Image: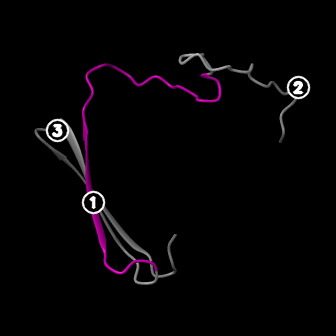
Amino acid sequence: MHSEQLHVIERFRLIEEGKTLEVDIYVEDPGAFTVPWRGTQRFALSERGPLLEAVCAENNANYFNHDVDPMPVASRPDF
């Protein structure tokens, strides 16, 4: 939720010799919050190689012994 007064500042920087991405976020919205909000998130560089795509809708393996219905398939696109 936010109002028309929403103001967001995001700052990205590399730290620890380029091995970590640090993201600082500052959010202020007098119409929705009583005080400004600030947060920091750090992401470490992965040495495991490229990221693999995993689509949840197609990743319907039965890992926890739940009944998994087969994936619905459309005969033609919806668009």
Alpha-carbon span between mark 2 and mark 3:
48 Å
Residue 68 in which image quadrant: top right
Under mark 2, the amino acid is: Ser
Q: Which residue is mark 2?
A: 75
Secondary structure at numbered mark 3: loop
Picture residue at 54% right of the left edge, 18% below the top: 64
Residue 64 lies left or right of residue 20; in this view the side is: right
Residue 14 in which image quadrant: top left
Q: Is residue 50 magenta?
A: yes
Main SS type for the magenta part?
loop
Residue found at the far left of this picture: 17
Q: In the image, which residues are magenta?
A: 32-59
Residue 21, image x and y in percent?
A: 24, 44
Secondary structure at numbered mark 1: strand
Residue 3, image x and y in percent?
A: 51, 78
Secondary structure at numbered mark 2: loop
Q: Is residue 44 magenta?
A: yes
Picture residue at 27% right of the left edge, 65% below the top: 38
Q: Which residue is mark 3?
A: 18
Q: Nearer the viewer, residue 73 or 49?
A: 73
Picture residue at 20% right of the left edge, 40% below the top: 20
